[in-house]
Amino acid sequence: MKYGRVYNFSAGPAIMPEPVLEEIRDEMMNYRGSGMCVMEMSHRSKVYQQIIDEAEADLRTLMNIPDNYKVLFIQGGATLQFSAIPMNLCKNGVFDYIVTGSWSKKAAAEAKKYGKVNVVASSEDKNFSYIPDVSDLPIDDDADYVYICENETIYGTTYQQLPNTKGKILVSDQSSMFLSKPCNVSDYGLIYGGVQKNVGPAGLAIVIIREDLIREDIDPKTPIYLRYDTYSKNGSMYNTPNCWAIYVCGKVFKYLLKNGGLEAQAKINEAKAKVMYDFLDSSKLFYGTVEKKDRSLMNVPFITGDKDKDAAVVAATKAAGFENLKGHKSVGGLRASIYNAMPIEGVQALVDFLKKYEAENA
């Protein structure tokens, strides 16, 4: 790590690729001869139009997004989509949710404001430490969609297989796994993610939605800025978008393409996660909180089983230059978020430190 940077294991806003940060730094005062920073330029300028067009084109290439899907850049982060999704996809007013953690639980609670919510499966009985069987769910015949949070950031669980929606639209919050591995977009009606975990700065969500799901005949009381057709008709620029975040995301898309795309990134992420989980499975002090079959490649929660010991370990890691390892209060312990930009050297350095700590504090 250069410039005296720490190994940052934050769940979000999170670590960024250093080559991307260096390129942004070099363009900060004068973007490609424009004489201004991207933060200063008009979103109606030809220069910025090229930035957003390239960002969308590169994302389409990265994910192999079919032509009948729209890419929308929406302000407000992922949480705003908790409301936008039921507002835009409502036909019968029935929504099926699979609740596997805090974020899917919050999304379901928000959707209740706009219709009937069925929780068709949940793992709350074991503090969200696993993904329930989703092969044969009681999908409502009138369900407008089936909703999942595909990777739960707080609890560190991820789906190994997508649910059987029995023909209903699948909606997935991919915030903390977005662009971490290949994705067959056609399996979904809508994918979205807040970008601050694995792609760019906070304040932006990317929504990938099948065109036929973008409707004009929704509740006329729906705020214009929450309507997907507003973004689709205006190229995500109905008003001033989050220009800076889109610019940075575009840089990350190009970085991923240059380095082998999502297939190559998935192999790197699998290798990093293996380093963490191999250590936890062999440790006598630390253990993971998630059932092995459902472990996330992105977020790794682990504990000692003693709150005071956990706090001491967190303090020791911070003193050693490892930042943001304190676990979420609902799980406790520690959590290492090892997103795309975390180098395997950082994961290995953390594991080496934890091994040493365990040996000295057995």
Image (cartoon, helix red, strand yellow):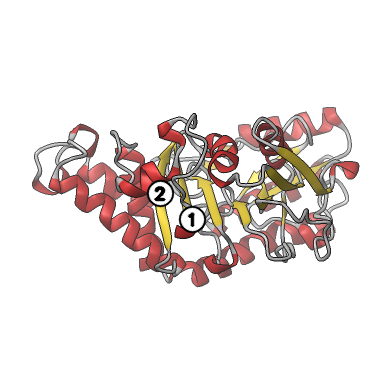
Is 242 placed above or below 92 here?
A: above
- Mark 1 touching mark 2, by CB under 8 A? yes
Q: Position of residue 87 (x, y in %)?
A: 56, 38
Q: Residue at x 49, y 37 (%)?
A: 77
What SS does tag 2 mark? strand
Q: Secondary structure at mark 1?
A: strand
Q: Which residue is mark 2?
A: 72
What is the three-letter code of the residue carrying label 1? Ile
Apparent side of residue 182 relative to residue 52 in the rendered image (left or right): right
Q: Which residue is mark 1?
A: 209
Q: Position of residue 197 (x, y in %)?
A: 53, 44
Q: Amino acid at mark 2?
A: Leu
The residue positioned 53% from the left and 47% from the top of the image is 193
Looking at the image, is 265 positioned above or below residue 138?
below
| Disc 2: CA contacts within 10 A as few (<14), some (14-19) or many (>=20) | many
Q: Toward the viewer: 20 or 154?
A: 154
Query: Quick check: can you spot residue 280?
Result: yes
Q: Give whichever of 49, 338 is nearer the camera.
A: 49
Q: Is residue 149 visible?
A: no
